[in-house]
Structure formats: structure tokens, C-alpha cells
Image (cartoon, coloured by chain):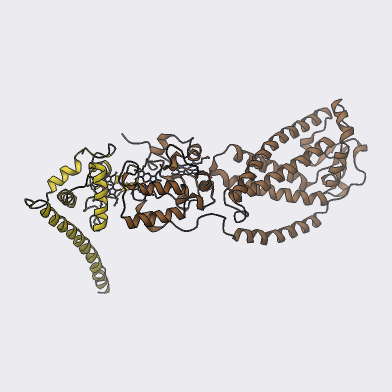
Chain colours: A yellow, B brown
Amino acid sequence: MTSRLLFVALLIPAIGVAALASAGRDGIVSALSAQAKQDNSKFTSFSAEAGKKFWFTAHVGGKSDTPSCVTCHTKDARTMGQTRAGKAIDPMAVSANPNRFTDPEKVAKWFGRNCNTVLGRECTAEEKGNVITYLMSQ
Amino acid sequence: MARHSEHSLGSEFFIWDLPTRLFHWVLVIGVAVALYTGFLAPASWLGIHLFAGYAIAVLIVFRLVWWKFGFEYSRLAALVAAIRRLPQFLPALIRLKPPHSAGHNPAGSAMIALLIATLSLIVVTGFMVEGGQEKQGVLAGVLDYAAGSTARNLHSLSANLLLGLIAVHLAGVAVETVLQRTPLVRGMISGRLPLPLHVVNPAPRPARPLAAAFILSAIAVAAAPAALALLRLPARGVPSAPLNLAYATECGACHNAFHPSLLPRQSWAAIMAHLGDHFGEDASLSPATAAGIAAYLDRNAAEAWDTEPANRLRSVAAAEPLRITAAPYWIRKHAGIGAATFAAAPIKSKTNCAACHGDATTGRFDDQAIAIPPTQAKGP
């Protein structure tokens, strides 16, 4: 009896944290979606397929050492990536790392940096939303 | 120990008391270890070098006391008397007919005085280098890096001098052993030497081990609290605070956060002013976060500290002033490590200081904390 109570008592915060994480992610995605509609009236919804393509493409316009997102985040988003300085990067796939895309400031900071490094420009809201949608599907 | 009745065994006479013989051979081991670890071994062996140095210091203190209380031939008085006979001895030595001596002959006595003086200088300057440069040991709270550097020059100079003295000492032992057929090495083991009766002191002063033990205990009792008080002083100019959290998080995202003491103010300022183009990447931060980190780096840059890396890494490379790994000192210290080692897992990069330096986040970079981890070559 007590052990079942204990289990429930532990489960509630666990569910709570998970729910909070996904709520944070949903908030980020819906904000991006609103921005994407504003930028492009024909925008309907994010596409994991387009996100995947963007993620793997060797872009031009950015730094030659980092042509693509997978240069650092690796081709399998469920595994550890690596920075140019050799430091490990936690997996980007939400299934492997439930904390991904839950802090709006962190998401904005890294999209800002990495898009500039890889593409030499900012990413559009649609590109960002597509990438997150792709990584949520992984 | 050195009792009168032990003086003569046939034509062999008791010359070297047990403490003197033990002193001699333990000193030989200590000096061999100190020379090897000082001149040849990797920096990470500093702990063994220091241990040998402490042992030699204790041996010298013992020997100075034993100069007063040892058996006749171990005494300072005998040493001085022998050195006084040097003017008569040297011409005889040049004619290859040196007279016999009980105990060290005049040239040998002069050598002992030089050896003890040189070893004392090495030990004292060693403590100063340890305190001033390495920020360890009893003088870490007292001496600054500059004093440690001066001491280091004297330390290496006197260590080189010691090598020369040892060579001459060994040559002297060989010459006396051959010319006079006196087995000096065996004498330093058994304590007895075959000698003509007329050179042996007819009334040798006996050893006074109890008096020596009393004086040595008194020295220990007086020195221990002084050493403890010194050890309790904080090391001079050594950072003690952990890394600022915002700095460690933001500047530790793509590489380990470098300790701020590893670059001068100007370099940090330039790095913080150009985060948008940071070694080929965009590392920009919000203006408020960047300002906080810039202020932290400015307060804690190399100029603010007195550790060895802070002193040495203040001089950056003119061509690449923003890189720690381009500084002449850094390059010199890591010249022996191949590019393949740096690239191999788990190191992966020169900038991964913490992979080889166990205390990298503290900024100390102690020699004893260096260990290159076992590496696997990079996969295909």
C-alpha cells in the first residue's frame, strides 16, 4: 500500500516535468508557427520531411568548416554529436533527449548562432519549425 | 655505535660511524632520484622530485647536527683540520704520493664542504621554486613568482654544479683507492679501513647519539609549528573561487571553459568584442550576458594572478593573440605531444586542457596533476 502510494507520489512530479517539457516545446513551436504565417500567408503547417532535408543539406554562404547541421550534430540525431573543438553534444532527437527545444531563449540563441555559422544568415521561422518538427519525430 | 673498543681490528680502524654511513648512502639514493626527476623525468614526476628534496633537506639537517656530535672523523672539527692541511697535501698529490689520512683526506674534506654547501643551496632554492613558481609547499604563501624564478635560475645552476662536484668526488675516491690501496667504498659500508697506525687519532672523541637526538627533536619541535603556520597561509596570487556560472555555461558549450587566468585582459576583451565571428563560428550572446562575462574575464585575467600559467601565458603570440594554444610558452610545453595524440579520443583537441590536466578548471596546472589519458587512434 505504502509502496504504491510512494510510486504515485514519485510519478506525479515525473509526469509533471515531462508535461512541462512538452508544454515548453509546444509553446515554442506555436510561436514559430504564428511567425511563419505572418511571414508567408500561404504557410499551413511544419513539415518533418522539409526539416530533414534542411538538416542534412550542405549549405553555401556559411563557414566552410561547417557546411551542414550534421557536421556537428551527426547524421543520426539520436546519438551524441561533437563540436569542432571535440566536445560532445547531447543528442538532438527529442526521443533521446527530452529536454530539447524546451527553453525559448536557448533555442533562439542556438538557431541564431548555428544558422549564421552554417548558412551565413538567419533561419526563417518556417525553417526552424521544420527542423524542430523533424527532430521531434526522431 | 661508535664505541672506543671498536677502534681497531688488527690493522683496520673504525672510522665511519653507522649514522654517517647511513647518511651517505641514503643521500646517494636521494640525490640520484632528485637528479633524475629534475633533469630527465616528465614534469608529472614533480611529486617524487619534491619528496627526494625533502628527504635531502632532512639528511642535511641531521648531518649538520652530527658534525657536532658524531664520532671523531664525522665531526666538523676533523673536516676543518683536514682542509687546513690542504697546502701540504696538494703538492704531494701532484707527485702521486699523497699521505694517508684517517677520515677524509684534505682534498676530500674540501669536497665534502662544497657538496654540503651546494646541496644546501639546492634545497633552499628548491623550496623557493616550489613556493614561488609552483605555489606549493611552505613558501607558497610567502613568495611571488618573480622570487621563484630567480630561485629557479640558482636551483638549476647549483644542480649543474652538483653534477660536476659528484664527478670530481667519484674521481677522488677512485684515485685514493688506487694510489693508496685504501678501499674507500668498502670503508663507507663497513665503517672500517686499513690504515697505518700513525695517522689514526689516538684519542678519538666518541659519538654522542643521545645529545644529537635531543637537539634534532628540539629542531623538529620548533620547526613543525612554523611549517604548519606557513602552510596555512593562502597561496599567493592563486585563484580559489570556482568558475563564474554564466561564464562556465556559455563559454563551456563548444569547448571546455578556459580558466580566465590563461589569457591577458586585452585578448579576452578582443574575444568578447567579436563573438559573432569566433574562430570561424558565431558564438554571440545577448548584450547583457556578454557584458557580465566580459567583466568577469577582465577581473580574473592573467594579470590578476601569480600562478605559473598566468605569468607565462601573459605573453601571447603576435600573430594569434586570442589563442592560448598559440602562446610561445604553451607551444614549448606541449612540443613533445604529437598532433595524433591531441586528435585521438578521448582528448580530441588541444583545447581540451582538462583531458590531461586534472586541475584545469582551477587555473593551477600543477605538474603533479598532469596525466595524458590512454588514447585510441581516430577511427576511419
- In this orientation, does residue B373 appear? no
Q: Where is residue A15 in the image (x, y as percent from the top left)?
A: 22, 65
| Callout count | 0
Outermost left residue:
A42
Residue at the location (91% across, 38% down)? Answer: B199
Q: Position of residue B256 (x, y in %)?
A: 39, 48
**Closest to the observer, B317 or B363:** B317
**Left or right, residue A114 beside residue B130:** left
Res A59 → quadrant: top left
- In this orientation, does residue B290 appear? yes
Q: Is residue B288 above or below residue A74?
A: below
Res A37 → quadrant: bottom left
**Left or right, residue B205 beside residue A116:** right
Q: Where is residue B271 in the image (x, y as percent from the top left)?
A: 38, 47
Q: Where is residue B232 in the image (x, y as percent from the top left)?
A: 59, 61
**Closest to the observer, B331 or B275:** B275
Q: Split into 4 quadrants, where in the image is the C terminus of chain B?
A: top left
Outermost top residue:
B95
Residue at the location (64% across, 46% down)? Answer: B52
Q: In this view, does A17 lie above or below B156?
A: below
**Closest to the observer, B38 or A27:** A27
